[in-house]
Image (tube, helix red, strand yellow):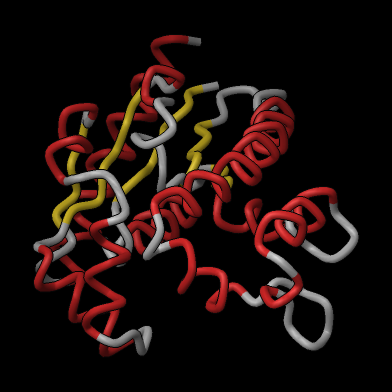
Amino acid sequence: MYLIGLTGGIASGKSTIARRLAELGAVVIDADVISREVVEPGTPGLQAIIERFGPDVLAADGSLARQRLGSIVFTDETALADLNAIVHPAVKRRSRELIDAASLVPGAVVVYDVPLLVETGRADEFDRVVVASAPEAVRLSRLTEIRGLDAGEAARRIGAQATDEQRLAVADDVVDTGGTMEHTLSQVDRIWDSARAASRASS
């Protein structure tokens, strides 16, 4: 197995890269999907969140009201740290199970799509780290125009994550997603070809 860590700040184009790698044949494991699974109704994760933040973070159907919780933690560093202490260990356990299962496929190239790779200090767990990058103005525009956040909330969410410099410090490859889709995909294709060659060489 050849393991790639894919990371990038919010609205950096990481999902586009992950989709392309999946199309090319990678096994993609999405930490965001896992992070939702570990706080579904009835899970220990959701119960811990209720105990820390109160029942007001629940939607009417008993699920986590993610935007409501986000408005709390992205303006309070202590609250964000408390949430991360609940969610990150559960995500790490589940992601390890999925990675171990994928490793049973001979020659597999596994991509772990994880926004907080730098923040959680996990860069050294991967054979290769790929960072999605776009200018902050582009990311702000995506958050406000596509995701519907107001400018202040968008800026706070960007500011709550690692800096571009911190991500670039651990990157083996950087994909510039600030240009055309064709430009983005061509960069991803080159990384895939290189990863496949490295995987074959190591097997």
Asked if residue 43 lies left or right of residue 32, the reply is right
Q: Residue at x 19, y 49 (%)?
A: 175
Horizontal and vertical percent for residue 23? 47, 57
Q: Residue at x 66, y 62 (%)?
A: 53
* 162 or 51, nearer to the observer: 51
Displayed quadrant of residue 11: bottom left
Asked if residue 65 lies left or right of residue 160, the reply is right
Horizontal and vertical percent for residue 101? 74, 30
* 21 or 119, nearer to the observer: 119
Asked if residue 39 lies left or right of residue 141, the reply is right
Q: Quadrant of the N terminus?
A: top right
Horizontal and vertical percent for residue 58? 73, 76
Horizontal and vertical percent for residue 164? 16, 45
List the single residue furthest toward the top: 202
Picture layout, residue 115 above or below residue 5 = below
Q: Residue at x 39, y 57 (%)?
A: 20
